[in-house]
Image (cartoon, grey):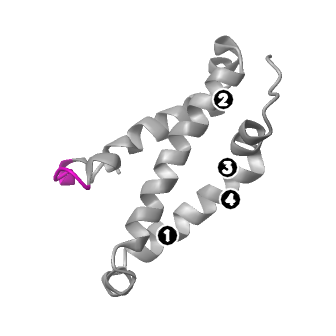
Amino acid sequence: MKTVENKLVKFLISESTVITVITLNAIVMFFDAFPTISEITAGRLFWIDYACVIYFIIEAFLKIMCLDCDDYWDNNWNKFDFFVVISSTPTLLEPFFDVKIFSAVL
């Protein structure tokens, strides 16, 4: 396993940071599901969710870069995490295209 020297990278891939962003994202997605709340926030919840998805993509790729590729893929949680992250990437197209066809996956 490679050692991570950069403090920012260590922070971004730390378990506490990941859990915090997961919790924030879950709360945002919960509240965004209510039309009244979504209307009151005027789309801000969408952009927080959007930022969380971008964070998860960056975090996954940083982990792959920081660990030997074999070490990353040997861990089943990393495989699951990568699958979830890749599955959520169609949301990044939402501001530009109608991605309602992906709503069942998302």
- Give the image location of residue 46, x and y in percent: 38, 66
Kindly report the distance in space between the C-alpha atoms of the residues bearing marks 2 and 1: 25 Å
Q: Are marks 2 and 1 in contact (CB under 8 Å)?
A: no
Check disc 1: other Cα within 10 Å, few if <14, some if 14-19, many if 20+.
Answer: some
**Amino acid residing under circle 4:** Thr
Give the SS element for disc 1.
helix
**Amino acid residing under circle 3:** Val
Q: Which residue is mark 4?
A: 20
- Give the image location of residue 64, x and y in percent: 62, 23
**Amino acid residing under circle 1:** Val
Q: Residue 105: give its label.
A: none
Q: Which residue is mark 3?
A: 18
Kindly report the distance in space between the C-alpha atoms of the residues bearing marks 3 and 2: 12 Å
At a point 17% along the width and 50% down the height, the residue shown is 97
Q: Residue 28: give its label.
A: 1
Q: Quadrant of residue 80?
A: top right
- Give the image location of residue 38, x and y in percent: 35, 79
Q: Between disc 3 and disc 1, whose residue precedes? A: 3
Q: Between disc 3 and disc 2, whose residue precedes? A: 3
Kindly report the distance in space between the C-alpha atoms of the residues bearing marks 2 and 4: 17 Å
**Looking at the image, residue 41 lies above or below residue 1:** below
Q: Which residue is mark 2?
A: 63
